[in-house]
Amino acid sequence: MTDNAGTLHADRPRGPLGKLLMAAAATALLFGAAAGSAAAADKIRWKMPVAFATKLPGLGDNAVYVTEALNAASGGNVRLKIFEPGKLVPPLEITQAVKDGKIQAGYTWLGYDQGRIPASPLLAAVPFGMEPWEYSAWWYEGGGQKLAEELYAEHGVHPILCGVIGPETAGWFIKEVNSLKDFEGLKIRFAGLGGKVLQKRGASVTLIPGGEIFQALEKGAIDASEFSMPAIDQKLGFHKVAKNNYFPGWHQTYTAFHLAVNKGTWDKLDKSNKALLDMACTAGVTRNLSKGEAIQGAIIRGFKDKGVTARRLPEPVLRELQKTTQEVLEEEAAKDPMFKKIYESQQKFAADYKSWKSLGYLPRDF
């Protein structure tokens, strides 16, 4: 058979089946080209210290999920080697090590940077702030990602949102809390902006890594501590010393984790590897939130058998803490332009979101 130009096409398939075969062949060529592009991309072999032990469910194990997903999706092209807290760099100094080029990347809670980057806690957890899905909406659709990249660019770091969990508990206390006076002189481990709030209310606040909290409680160095959600805290044994677990987690209504990548390293990556890292972390956000929400109920139901009492902070205490929080946020915004810029962005987004939130969802006590 020939076409009008006289070219021979004796092997061209005809009819519906022929068209299907031709489409399949074209698709195969496209996938082959994509696979070839991925194979041609530079291989990534990074050391990645983590701020939280990977044995901690919902807190540390998300880093494992992300690294395994990257390895599988890239066909082994992208491999991040996890180093447990303190094995490579101190857990509170991960982003500094990334900035200095000692490591290419780290998985951490950006609130630990508060001392040198005042606005960083806004990306990690805000007292009386947004709920987890609201925060992720702000990050992906409300300008949060762009602001975070702007903030950290001058510190030589590219932040990628890589995990989110729900509110922490308000803390584990050896003695009961019945009024704000009970915070005065209280020795407590607290992180982020919530720590500044309690300091303003007279507490003696210290920040120590999660792995050191149990010993501090046991030896009486501290009287109380917050860290994370019940299933995570139980792994660290806080319930063996402090029998009063308070709720709600006013100081961290969401807890966000980021993959911090050295900016020079990030800028040199090809587009395909950047896309892989972004997609794996976005998947990590969804899986992390799901895991965190799924595993708390059973732990709380088991409190009684462990002699633990789940308690609610009295509403007057929460109202006063909210007032103090507003004072702290305004003070921080007045001192730091980037804090002000990010805080105002979050406030505007939250105000818009409230119109939907107040109408779209059933009341919590329905």
Image: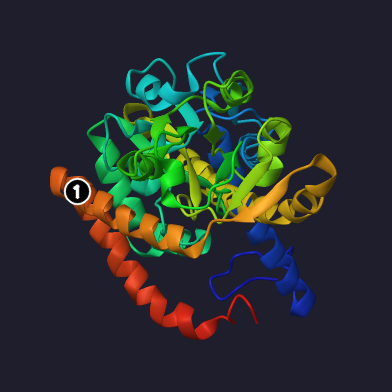
Q: At x 30% / y 52%, what residue is drawn?
A: 146
* In-front residue for pair 282/225: 225
Q: At x 22% / y 46%, what residue is drawn?
A: 332
Q: In this view, does 185 lie to the left or right of 346?
A: right
* In-front residue for pair 162/175: 175
Q: Name the residue under label 1.
A: 331
In x, y percent, where is residue 69? 66, 41
Can residue 29 be seen in this snapshot? no
Q: At x 59% / y 39%, what residue is drawn?
A: 173
In x, y percent, where is residue 17? 79, 74
Q: Three-letter amino acid code at disc 1?
A: Glu
Can residue 51 be seen in this snapshot? yes
Which quadrant of the view contains residue 157? top left
In x, y percent, where is residue 315? 49, 64
Please determine whether, in this image, residue 244 is positioned above or below residue 261: below
Image quarter of the N terminus: bottom right
In x, y percent, where is residue 334? 14, 49
* In-front residue for pair 102/345: 345
Q: At x 33% / y 68%, what residue is drawn?
A: 349
Please determine whether, in this image, residue 120 is positioned above or below residue 52: below
